[in-house]
Structures are given as C-alpha cells and as structure tokens.
Amino acid sequence: MHRQTLPIDQLGAWARLNNVEFNGVKIMASQGDKGSGLVTTAERSIDNPLLMTIPNDLVLSLENVWVYAKSDKHLRQVLEATGDYSRTARGAILIFLLLQVTNGATGGSIGVSNPFSEYVKFLPLRVPLPTTWNESERAIVTGTSLEAALSAKLNGLDRELNLLKEKTSSIDWCQKCWWDAASGTLTLDDWKTVDAMYRSRALDLPGTGHSMVPCIDMANHASGGSTSALYETDGDGNAILVLREGKDLAPNDEVTITYGDEKGACEMLFSYGFIESTVKSARELFLDLSIPDDDPLKLAKKAVAQSAPGFRLFLRGDSTDWESSFVWLLCVNEEDGLEIKLLQKNDGERELQASWKDKEITDMSNLVKLLKLEPLWDVFALRAIITCQNRVEQQLFRLEGSKNSVDELLIIGEVDNDIRANAMQLRHLEEILLLHAYGDFETKKSQILDSPVVQQYLGATMASNPGVSEDDFS
Ligand SMILES: C[S@@+](CC[C@H](N)C(=O)[O-])C[C@H]1O[C@@H](n2cnc3c(N)ncnc32)[C@H](O)[C@@H]1O
C-alpha cells in the first residue's frame, strides 16, 4: 500500500493543533542513525521537570481505539469482524494503524480522518526491525537466539494477515481495497510495517497499559545513567514526559527515555532494531527445546506445558543462571512419578490432567517444587543441567558453524551497514554468554555428580544397563 509521508519539521504544527504541550523541547529531524529524536530548546532542570503533555484522548490505547470506532464505521467493522483479536491492545492498535494507512492510501475515502491519520505520516517509512530485513540480513543472525524468534514472528505475522483476510473478505470495501487480486493493495510488508510501528513505539503507560503516545514516541533510547526523562500519567489522565531526578539538560541536549534497561540484546534488536554500542553483555537469551520422539508422553507433555518450550538463560551477577518450568517436564517420566491422564468432565468435555505421585499439578511452575521434596531431587536437577548444557553446546555449534557463510554474505549479500553492525554485535555477545553458561553448567554438573544420591543412582543404573555411561545420563 502506498504510504504518504510528511516532513518531520511539520510535526510541531500538528502538535499545536492537537493541544500537545512542549515545554522547552522540540522534535529534531535527525539524530544520526537513530532517526528523529527529541532535544531541548532551553536549559532544563528538576525545578521545572515537565517536558511534554499529551492529552488523554491522543493516547492510543485499546480503550481509545474503541472510542474512535464509535464514530468510524470502517474501523468498527474490522474490529468487530476480528473478534477476540481486537480486544487486545496490540490487535486493536494494529488494526487502527492499518486503517490510518489505508485512509492515506485512499485519499481519505476509507475511515474518518483523525489526528493519527496525519501522525502516521511523520513516522519513518522504514523501521529497521528484523521482520523487515531481507534474506541475507536474516541469514547473518543464524546461530543467535534471534534466528528462532524471528522465524516464529514472521510465521505469526503471516498467520495474522491470513486471519484478517478470512475475517474481513466479506466486507465489501476490505475486499476491494485490501484483498481483491486487481484492486487490493494490502501486502504482508504493510502488515509488517504496522507491527513494527507498534512494537518499536509502544509504551507501558502507567494506569493505561500498552499504548502508543504521539510525540513521546519520538524520544530515543538511552540506558542506565544516560536516560534523561520518564513518562507518566498525570492526575487528569494525560501522558506526560518529565525530567529524571538528578538530570540537568543544556539547550540542544537530546532528551531520552529507556525502552527497558533489563531487556537483553536479542530483545532490543528484535523489538527496536538496534543494540546500543556500549552494551557489553547479551544479558539474556531464550533457547528452545523439543521433547524427544521416544518420550512416550511427548504429545501429552506438549499439551499440558503452560510455557514456551525452552529455557531462559541469563546473567545473574558474575554467573549465569537459567529458568524454565518446561525443562522439568522434559526431565521426568512415568517411571519417576509423572502421570498425565485424559479426564472426562461433567459437561462431556475431556481434558488432560498432570499429576506427580497422585498430587494434581494445575500450575506447571509447581512441578519443580514437588521435585525438590523428592529423595531423587539431585538426580532430576542433574538431568535438567545436562539438558540445558547440551542445548547450549548445540547453539554454540550452530553459531560457530555459520561463521563462514556469514562472512561470505557480508561480502556478497545485500546487507545494510547498521544491520550488519547490530547483527555482528549480537553474535559476539551471545557467543560470550553461551560460553560462560557452558562453563557454569560444567561446574554445577561436577558438583552434583559428587552427590551420594546421584552416585548411588548412577551405580544402580549402570549395573542394570551395562551399556549405559555417565554421559548417557540425560
Ligand atoms: C520510539 S522510536 C523513536 C523515534 C524514532 N527515532 C523516529 O525517527 O521516529 C524507536 C526507534 O528509534 C530508533 N532508536 C531509538 N533509540 C535509538 C538508539 N539509542 N540507537 C539507535 N536507534 C535508536 C530505533 O529505530 C527504534 O526502533
């Protein structure tokens, strides 16, 4: 779909028209590779911390999308057709943004023009999130945790667009403008664009939740002590940007917020398209795990697992640690005490019920608590460590094994320079974290292997299965 644009220096006029108040700040066209940003026009200090006020009705939240829908038939039709999807903040806001882009592309004939129909024209034409990267750019993150996250996200976006098509094809104007082979112009790239707009600009606004706040979303990110401002909600429900305590800004200083200092390098690149060059650690990453085909409870375990299949590896102080409720499900079976049964409910429905030695498990995060009470706890803990360590090793092989093809792509592929720098930084940071984790798992493994419970268990297992060694333990 053709996206109309407006020069960013006209955003000041848009802001005045829509009662956005700037106090000693303005939007600056270019902040180097960061796109537009916010800068001060005068000295700012904590004596007068208010930098910007955005009226409540300009905050794009789930609630406000439905308020706009009351006076916009086209928006309402799509929201209603998509059911539960548009009852979530992300779903409703994505549809709203798509309607604004459609409004611009159809010269205003679809939807009712509102402040956002103009505002989206100030947003960058290209948001460099990995979902918008080309094939070569995607291939250079092979072996990082972004590889799986990106592939899942791309599949998810494709599914969402197909669902949107299925639900709205019967609406005449949707069929004509979006889906019709001759006149429809909506593509997967458009859907990726609205998703990227939302993901890279959404804030968790206190009292409102996930929302997009025009003008505050022009603030770039800086972490730690470099963050200069915070967003909040004032007593009247307006969104405000205020100076951080202890910060004094001189004229022309950039005003920054944090997009989440706790986020790992992969999540930063995934959601915002960059990693700060000063970042020295990947901080955390997620590795997926699959249940082996020879596990007799494979399908049942998949059905009762309440979390993503994998584990989160993260830095805690100087060491690495991991967390997952899925891993524990992977490490025990019927012979240990896990049971998963199909129950017939009173209403005729059937459901799977998991239990550990006759204790029902409704919340899978409780499985580890029950395992910790078992005499064989050290054995289960060792299985979990070996499972995670093997997966870390596999990831290191994939990262290492892709180095030559990545080097080649950097020479012959079409790779944007910023994307190259970010992707290579991610590869480097994740390799360090994985190596660190591998070493920490090794230490934990040798400690736990000394436990009398494990020694006794291994002795008994090897005696009854002469072909089995300690290495086969997982
Ligand atoms: C909320 S928007 C900020 C405004 C944006 N610069 C614009 O031109 O509209 C977030 C996007 O700005 C860019 N960005 C923000 N902070 C950055 C930083 N510290 N380094 C590089 N890019 C940054 C990224 O493209 C990110 O996805």
Image (cartoon, rainbow, N blue to C red):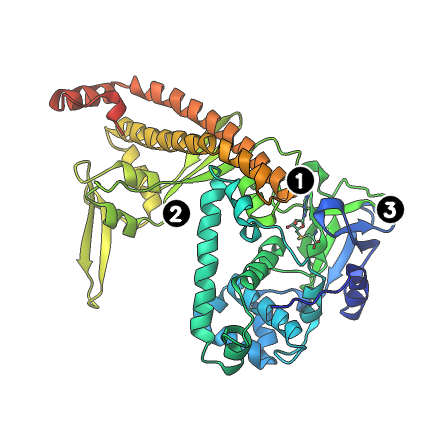
The part of the image, by quadrant, that contains residue 429 is top right
Residue type of the residue flagged with mark 3 = Pro
Residue under pointer 2: 308
Residue at 58% from the left image edge and 79% from the top image edge: 70
Q: Secondary structure at mark 2?
A: loop
Residue under pointer 3: 251
The part of the image, by quadrant, that contains residue 17 is bottom right
Q: Are marks 3 and 2 in contact (CB under 8 Å)?
A: no
Estimate the spatial distance between the alpha carbons at disc 3 and disc 2, rounded to whole Å. Answer: 47 Å
Residue under pointer 1: 223
Asked if disc 1 is less than 8 Å from ligand 1, the answer is no
- Which sits earlier in the primary sequence, circle 2 or circle 1? 1
The part of the image, by quadrant, that contains residue 21 is bottom right
Residue 206 visible in the shown view: no
Q: Residue 167 versus residue 13: which sits nearer the camera?
A: 167
416 on left or right of 287:
right
Residue type of the residue flagged with mark 1 = Ser
Residue 364 pos. (x, y %): 32, 46
Q: Residue 241 versus residue 215: which sits nearer the camera?
A: 215
Estimate the spatial distance between the alpha carbons at disc 3 and disc 1, rounded to whole Å. Answer: 21 Å
Judge whether 101 appears above or below 195 on screen. Answer: below
Residue 284 pos. (x, y %): 51, 36
Residue type of the residue flagged with mark 2 = Ala
30 on left or right of 161:
right
